[in-house]
Amino acid sequence: MNDITFELNHEQVTITADPSLRLLDVLRDRLHLTGAKEGCGEGECGACSVLINDQLANSCLVPLANVHKQRVTTIEGIATTKEGKLLQQAYSKEGAVQCGICTPGMMMASYALLKKHPHPTREQIQIGLSGNLCRCTGYNMIFRAIERAAKEGEGTW
Amino acid sequence: MNDISRSIPKLDSVPKAFGNERYVNDIRYENALYAKTLRSPHAKARILRRRYPELPAGYHIIDHTHVPGENVVNIIADDQPVFAADRVTYYQEPILLVIGPDKRVVLKLMKDIHIEYDIEVPQFEWTDSVVHYHFTKGNLAKVKEQADKVIRREYHSGYQEQLYIEPQGMIGYHDGKQVILEGSLQCPYYVKNALIRTLNCADDYVRVRQATVGGAFGGKEEFPSLIACQLAVAIEVIRKPIRLIYEREEDVESTTKRHPSHITMTAYVKDNEILGIQSEVGLDGGANIGLSGVVLSRALIATTGVYTIDHLDVTGDVYRTNTVPNGAFRGFGAPQMLFAVEMFMHHVAAELKVDALAFRQRYLAKQGDHTSTGGTFRDPIIMPEMLSRVLDESDYLNKRERYASPDSHRGIGMSWVLHGCGFTGSGEATHIKARVKLHKRTTDEVEILIAAVDMGQGVKTTMTKLVATILDVPMSQVIYDNPDTNFVPDSGPTVASRTMMIVGGLVARAARRLRDEWNAGEDQWIEERYVQPDYIKWDETTFHGDAYPAYSWGINIVEVEVDPATYEVTVLETWNIYDVGKAIDEQVILGQADGGQLQGLGLGYLEVMNHKQGVIQQRNVTDYIISTSVDTPPMHNYLMDNPYPLGPYGAKGAGELTLVGGAPAVALAIEQAIGKEIHEIPVTPERIMELMNDE
Ligand code: FES
Ligand code: FES
């Protein structure tokens, strides 16, 4: 058991726990943030995506110890931002949400992508989402949602 | 009135995007216990003895001895036990649950359980036929004598895993009156009926609620009944909340998949005309029959695809092997058959040295033609218009000519498909007998009470829109919640592309009645029941008559490039056109089109799964490869209106149609790019290499 302190969605949290616990489990079971989902548990599907110091990461592969004194952002943290709302509206308008299990992770990947490339090409979008699997949508509507969010959010990203 | 097809944002897209939607794994009950399944390490064995460890307080082992009713998961045949009792028939078959508060303790207890087996020789060959069907049309024996040429080919397809991103799972508790289960499932009443049998209890003792489903594609049609029965037995004994949620590997190794198939087609030809066809279809059912017989019948009925052939002899078998049981997957037997028949029509044309497109056009079904089972295509068939549109959009003819040169390393392929809407045969009338209800509250809000599940395909949005449009009230006045068997009537399972056409049809009828009988401020109930149109006649034993009330139609065109050095296939672009009657929401159908096609293409060239001695070799997304964003081609989808008189606003089935043509279209494209006939999917680089080396 250790005390692990990190910034979560702009608030300081301290957790007393086994430092080898997966960040995903700590978020979901201890902090009740269930927006990050478990699809594979192996770092391959992206359903558990979060940002660590603004970098996209698969929280199923991150031991809690690794986020000590770091900055973690989850979908719950993005949801209240202007960028989050822009993305959500674009996803809704473009039909990019089906079963929705991949969607929070996709939103995180989209957010990270647009922060890096405010005017992404199709190829940049495809590469930016390549760590996030979706079995429902066939991805094209997600690509278009990101393009829409880039356009409608001109200047925001 | 607005055109109903005009798209609206999906009602659940906001909570889903922000992660607020509650999937089964997000449900938290105070003190819920953790459950883990102990599974067979053998493909076939007798269980001789069990030695269970001393259990610490609060820990439990639940096995077949605890089942109060029948140790059978109610599907069709009674061959899947809830818990294996004295024998196991496939690797990873469930034997018992270990349950307790701490996952680590549970996992440790699992290791201390000793089961002694008498290992038997497993069956992996396809020899033990457990379902056999045969039917004929016309008189094939006679045309065999007239034929001047016989053309025969064999086609093979492998496993396909649904790979919904949310693994299977269920959570439940006892509230003092009922066993209440909430889970990721497609068919609340399949689960409920299975529970009643396993618990041997009264109808109102069990309650099944659908949690938001993170993808299903048929994989959550029959399988959840197994999890539910196990969990319910445990809850009966322990009387505490329990979670039984699969991890990915466990899900992939032990749950149902698409049936591998072997299909032999033989054409009897005279003067370059097909007189008749014989087809023999074999499916690997796995260790129990489950839904395999129904899957087989859909495959057999699709035996001539979109073509009218007057003389047919069709046989099919489901083989029992000691492998993981196979089951429902979007398309339900049709993808394997349509792959075979689309390839075959091209291979026959090639052998006759005639143009494949013109050859196929000669046999394309027309309104009034007889189906493979001697039923009638009653409604207008608009494939010719669809064809000319999609040929134009894709520039198919020019590309087909250009890519004929082997140096291009490119190819373009086109499949023509149909999909029978709703249950096969008289299933709707005799087995399902769907009922739906609308409830108008005194607030004038209208509740839709149906058992149809939204698993991403948009039921919540389209049903609400349908009712709101008919009643001419705002969408916010119409309520659809995830089904709960305490409140919704049995409108049947969420399968077979039946939800909008059949259930939606009933809902629309109820809504029209409500509109006519509307009394503001009054509590009103409307119920509708399915009635089979009386011109639909189906004989289940001879496979004769109308197998489906209606058909949806589609054309898929796929363009590929094959790397001449690595044989890597790149899908460059696709063009697809569909007749689904009428889209209740255009964007919803286009979303089905994108997603269904990617799965269909995956079956054709990408998704490899096999077993070795009954052990599935691909266990996670690291080794079972599905399309990622990078593999996804631009997909151009077009919808044509062709309203079906009995569907709501003319809607027919859509969900499965978008998958079934993907595999043959991509295989035909690869065939052109490499200049070799293809008989087996998925067409992987290894398979292409074999074909290229095999001069
Ligand atoms: S659950 Fe973390 S990447 Fe799949
Ligand atoms: S929407 Fe279902 S997995 Fe992406």
Image: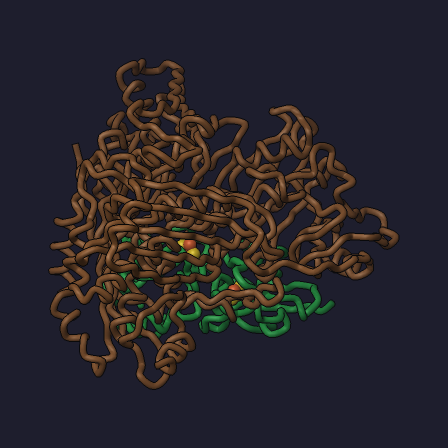
Q: In which quarter of the image is the N terminus of chain B?
A: top left
Which corner quadrant of the figure contains ligand 2?
A: bottom left
- B161 relative position to A15: left or right: left
Q: Residue furthest bottom?
A: B565
Question: What colouring does the structure picture have?
Answer: by chain
Q: Nearer the viewer, residue B163 or B183?
A: B163
Q: In which quarter of the image is residue B201?
A: top right
- A44 relative position to B648: left or right: right
Q: In which quarter of the image is the C terminus of chain B?
A: bottom left
Q: In which quarter of the image is residue B76?
A: top right
Q: Which of B195 and B607 is in front in this view?
A: B607
Residue at the spot 39% in from the left edge and 29% down from the top edge:
B448
Q: Which of B459 and B84 is in front in this view?
A: B84
Residue at the spot 34% in from the left edge and 40% down from the top edge:
B461
Chain the render paints brown = B
Q: Residue B288 at what x, y percent from top left?
A: 59, 48
Residue at the spot 76% in from the left edge and 37% down from the top edge:
B237
Q: Residue B506 at what x, y percent from top left?
A: 34, 27
Q: Nearer the viewer, residue B682 or B121?
A: B121
- B175 relative position to B648: left or right: right
Q: Residue B104 at what x, y percent from top left?
A: 74, 60
Residue at the spot 64% in from the left edge and 27% down from the top edge:
B205
Is residue B440 visible from the viewing direction of this image?
no
Is residue B611 visible from the viewing direction of this image?
yes
Chain the render paints green = A
